[in-house]
Amino acid sequence: MPYKFTFDLSKISRFFFKEIARTSYQKGMHKKVSKTVHEVIRRFKIQEATGLNLSDAVLLLEDFIDIQARNLLERDSFVQTRKRALFLPHCSRKYMDNRCKAAFDPNIPSYKCAHCSPDCLINRAASFAEKKGYDVYILPGGSCIPKILESKRYEGVVGVSCGEEIKLGGEMLKSMGVTGQAVPLVKNGCANTFFSLGNLLDLL
Ligand code: SF4
Ligand code: SF4
């Protein structure tokens, strides 16, 4: 399920995301970050930069913090895993039409990148992950996750998607005893979306 609003944080400084990591750590320590969330939104001029109203900006930031906090909590067990998969969102492909040469397997269902475009974000993420031994799936939606996990029995999964999908996917992983790490999209909209490749490579 996508957010009911669109956002684009791709121009926000990388320091913003470091601040989220710091705030997430505080959340784990204190469980009370409401004031901090408002302060971070004000300090990084998130409303001015994105046009989001305050409640949408707060929801977005709280999701980012939850994701980061969970990454921190699960990091130690994730690094112990050996059989891993990377789930990438189909909406970050360079092309959403038949110029994308990814092969679609309806049995999974998922796309497999054919590496047709060197500047495609999905290509760059998939190429790196494949070299590191990950099985890579480009998913049309989170509902494919249980089927993949049931058939392949991965120990660890890294997922990229918008925050709401990450929350749903995280619940699925938890119920199946799989350790997860996640990277939220910084630009949503279900096409031409964007995530930080740097943040993903750090997690992988
Ligand atoms: S590089 Fe991969 S994901 Fe990107 S457009 Fe080509 S086949 Fe599709
Ligand atoms: S933005 Fe991408 S990951 Fe989020 S719901 Fe839309 S298609 Fe799925």
Image (cartoon, rainbow, N blue to C red):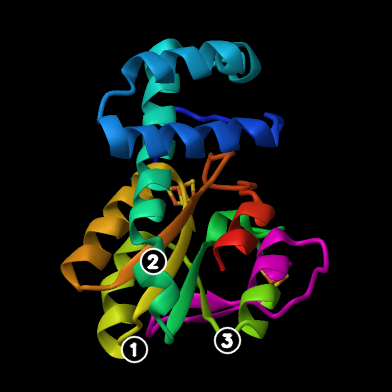
Decide: is 76 above or below 197.
below
Alpha carbon separation for disc pair 2 and 3: 19 Å
Residue denoted by label 1: 152
Alpha carbon separation for disc pair 2 and 1: 22 Å
Which mark is nearer the camera, 2 or 1? 2
Alpha carbon separation for disc pair 3 and 1: 14 Å
Q: Can residue 7 be seen in this snapshot?
A: yes
Residues in magenta, as a range: 98-126
Asked if labels 1 and 3 touch by Cβ distance under 8 angstroms, the answer is no
* Residue 76, numbered circle: 2
Whichever of labels 2 and 1 marks the residue nearer the N terminus, that label is 2
Residue denoted by label 3: 133
Asked if labels 1 and 2 touch by Cβ distance under 8 angstroms, the answer is no
Mark 3 crowdedness (10 Å alpha carbons): few <14, some 14-19, many ≥20: few
- Element at label 2: helix
Q: Outermost residue, front direction?
A: 29
- Element at label 1: helix
* Residue 28: x %, y % from top left: 30, 39
